[in-house]
Amino acid sequence: IEPLSVAETPVGLRDVAPPPAAVCNWSCYLARYPDLKAAFGENLEQAEQHWKHSGHQEARDCTCEEPGIPDALEASVPEVQDVVVADCPVRGLEFPNPFSREVLRELYDHDGLYANSIVFNLGKIRRTWEGLLYRRRVLQNCDVVLALSRLLKDGLLLTPFGMDFSRVQSSRYGALTATGSELVEDPDVVQLRKVYFWTRVSKFYWEVDMPHWYRQVGDLQGDLSSRERNILAAFRRDGFVLIDHWDGVDVERLMQEGRRTKDNPALEPLLRPGSLLRKLVRGYLGADASYHGVQYFELRPDATRRTYVNGAWHHDGCGTRLKAFIYLTDVDEQTLPTCIAAGTHRTHWYPPTNYFQGIFGHNKLNATTVHKHYGPSITKMFAPRGGGFLFDTNALHAACMTGATKQRDVFILDFASVEHMEKLPRMKRGPDDDYMSAWTPSLCPGSHPERIRWDFVHH
């Protein structure tokens, strides 16, 4: 499949409207068809041109619809706020409603990835989630309101996109504990999980990944220097860490190897026992970790939110998964750097923000709302070539898409805990959570031929 330029596209097909049943999402279109992904990479504009030119004639599916969601869930229901019990002893408490029409309008990015589909799907998203909550009768329970009130007093942080329980953990159990899992069984937290975090995907975040956030981490058998301890502490605090130069990386040799990913000898110093990257991955995850290979990525200066699938604000929806970026070019104000909202890596995100929950693929968020709530904490990942950064993809992140004149070239390495990989449920959607969530086999991360296990305890 050869990419089509606008000039090559027949005039009569450039502005052909999709059939009425199709509300296209070009990210999902590329993800669904490996031949298109191989041909176009993440170029959404070329994906759209392909579908208009030949894809719809080949009966290719360009939507993100998940057929497993029962139509009955879309019945008209009251707004969540209207069904909260009125006779609780708590007064003046604003009950968070991430499923309302008003909140959803402010939640998503309307100008980029979802320009064609968000208006169509907004009502469906609202009716689907609120319909389930109404039928499950979790909101008419005064216990939920009382639990929220107590959690707010103990430091629960609310945002339009999710909840951060870190201060609750600290005030009730200690910032770090032997297991890190106390919140899973906390009676007040259990009440809120019934309302906001009851899907299969959310359950995995709480029971498998979250304990690593609050678990005490050993000293890696005493092999951390004072500098490395400080770097690891900053990484665990912010969810990312900038690196001026990755230890042992020879940039000139990397450039000579070109885009080679498999068995690239210039990347070997990053992965050998005792390397800074290896220590940071193991220290952050606090468990046996696995390395899932490397990809080469370039971001052209003319990229936009319409052509670069991950340009808008989002979290990956994978839970705790780490990516290391190795820069082959200087990344500064003349490039399109990654931007990360510091401290958001421990947020339990509301389901409508999640790629794998509800209507599949809707996870790109409104930049104005993000900057309003996280502005001072947003950091640009600037570093010279040979440097880069390491971050938790559960943190809110985007590409800062303005003012670029230079291309960004990087290698990206992928890591997760062994427990994450072994317990990640990849079965199709089912009745266990009313068909509302599932991961795909190839993401978060997928099984990679270069996968290597790093034992935390023995090495």
Image: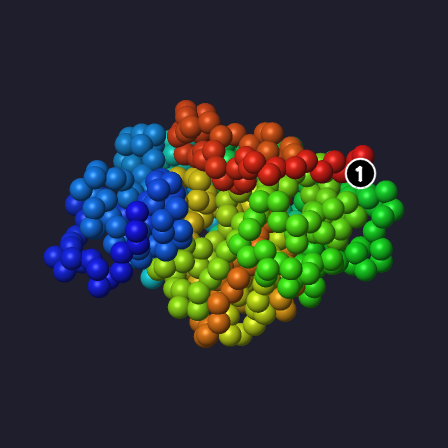
Percent coordinates x, y for residue 215 in the rendering: 73, 41
Q: Residue furthest left?
A: 12
Q: How many marks?
A: 1
Percent coordinates x, y for residue 426 in the rendering: 49, 30
Percent coordinates x, y for residue 183 in the rendering: 66, 38
Query: Is 84 above or below relative to 338?
Result: above
Q: Residue furthest front?
A: 256
Query: Is 335 above or below relative to 96?
Result: below
Colour style of the rendered protein structure: rainbow
Query: Residue flagged by tag 1: what amino acid is it?
Result: His
Can residue 296 be seen by looking at this rendering? yes
The residue drawn where x is 27% and y is 56% is: 4
The residue drawn where x is 42% and y is 28% is: 428
In the picture of the structure, the residue carrying the numbered disc 1 is 459
Helix, strand or loop at label 1? It is: loop
- Compare residues 444 and 357 and report the one nearer the observer: 444
The residue drawn where x is 20% and y is 50% is: 53
Relative side of 75 to 300, left or right: left
Quadrant of the rendering where the C terminus is positioned: top right
Q: Which residue lies furthest to the right in this view?
A: 222
- Compare residues 76 and 197 and report the one nearer the observer: 197
- Residue 421, quarter of picture: top right
- Compare residues 189 and 325 and report the one nearer the observer: 325
Relative side of 418 to 424, left or right: right
- Compare residues 353 and 224 and report the one nearer the observer: 224
Q: Which residue lies furthest to the top in this view?
A: 431
Can residue 210 be seen by looking at this rendering? no
Relative side of 345 to 273, left or right: left
Question: How many residues crowd mark 1 within 10 Å: few (<14), some (14–19), many (20+)?
Answer: few
Relative side of 362 to 376, left or right: left
Percent coordinates x, y for residue 259 in the rendering: 53, 54
